[in-house]
Image (cartoon, coloured by chain):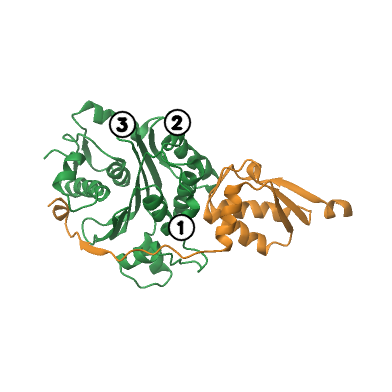
Chain colours: A orange, B green
Amino acid sequence: MNFQELNSTMKLSIKQKVASDLALRDSANRFFDQLEKTPSKSITVSFTGIKSISRSFAHQYLARKADSTKEILESDVPEVVSKMFAVVQRPGKKYELPKLSVRRLSSVDAAFS
Amino acid sequence: MTYNPFKFCFAMDALPELLKNYALFCKYRSDALATKQIDLSELEFIFPTTLLPLTDFVISDRAFGIVPPEDEVVADYIAFMLDGKPIPGGPRMPLRELPKDRSQADALIGEIAASQNRNNVCCGESAFKYFLGELVDNIYEHSEFSRALVMAQRYDSLRFVEMCFFDNGLTIPGAQAKHGKKRTPIESLQAAASGVSTKSVERGFGIGSSIRLATEGFNGKFLLVSGAAALSVDSSGGREFDLTGPLALDGTLVSIRIPFSSKDVNLYDYIG
């Protein structure tokens, strides 16, 4: 590996490395585990072809990016992804479960009565 | 007694519909434990919310004799849902196991979405896949299951889809107890739905956002049964159920019914 390779910017397609639908935290972790092993200090992650992303994936992606030793940039980020990154970075209120009545179902017959 | 879930809609007005169908599974389970036989002979219709936990029950203990439904259509349906080869884009998503290798789960999520939300009958692609992704991710992150199953059906004539996920893992009360949280089963489900994560304060959006998206965004019905507690939410509100006793579940069942809709759902309005 030479100096030029170390300082070049590598471009990675997250669709090719993961999937077009980014769902699981574990997928984000595996993606970053691969990314950390690359020699380049600077990496551009292309989001071309991404159709959906879960909040969990987006959260894990951003957490791993923040902890990474690499300089990571994103390119070709579709709206579904940029909006989800914004949601994660500016978390709103969590779901508030309404005050609910509790009913005890102590027997199968009780459910059918 | 004829086991017809549609008839139960009238006989058990007090219970939410998905919970009625879960209770029907409990009925079969109780009868089987007493008689060593699962008698489906009078079955006229069965939804995934009954069939999926019943399937796990049978897989877990094969000592039961099974009397098949007399109705051939129902018998054929069950046979297909348990062992059929899915038709790409078809309305039936037969029994599938969540792969132990999480890297293979993405393909299964895509398969469920292609079958159940074909032509975006419920909502846009990204909202539907977001919903599935959060549900499946929660199972992998928290359950520590040895078996996790999924089954779904798109009812084109009834104009809704019903998707069920079951895992035989820790349960939500069990996972919280493992992290030192002393809560009743009901309190555990409340905490999980309200975003109290066992991992960090930045997490815990999964179940709550899924419930909100399903019930407010998709205008659907959401049932969560875990251990000895159940939570049922739809657009009219929610109810909780203490299932301590014969209606408790050794695992977690999530059942969702989503009506067909012509509107696209802006998921960002619901996920906080």
Image coordinates for residue B90, horizontal then vertical, percent:
41, 30
Residue B150: quadrant of the picture: top left
**Which residue has dot 3 on it?**
B157
Of labels 2 and 3, earlier in sequence is 2
Q: CA distance from mark 1 to mark 3?
A: 31 Å
Chain letter behind tag 1: B
Residue B144 seen: no
Q: Amino acid at mark 3?
A: Ser
Residue at position x 45%, y 64% in the image: A94
Instruction: Tell me the crowding category of disc 2: few under 14, some 14 to 19, or many 20 or more residues within 10 angstroms, Cα based.
Output: some
Looking at the rendered image, the disc whose residue lies closer to the viewer, 1 or 3, is 3
SS type, badge 3: loop
Q: Specify the label residue B89 is tagged with.
A: 2
| Residue at x 45% of width, y 45% of height | B98
**Label whose residue precedes the other's in the sequence (1 or 2):** 2
Read off the residue under disc 1: B206
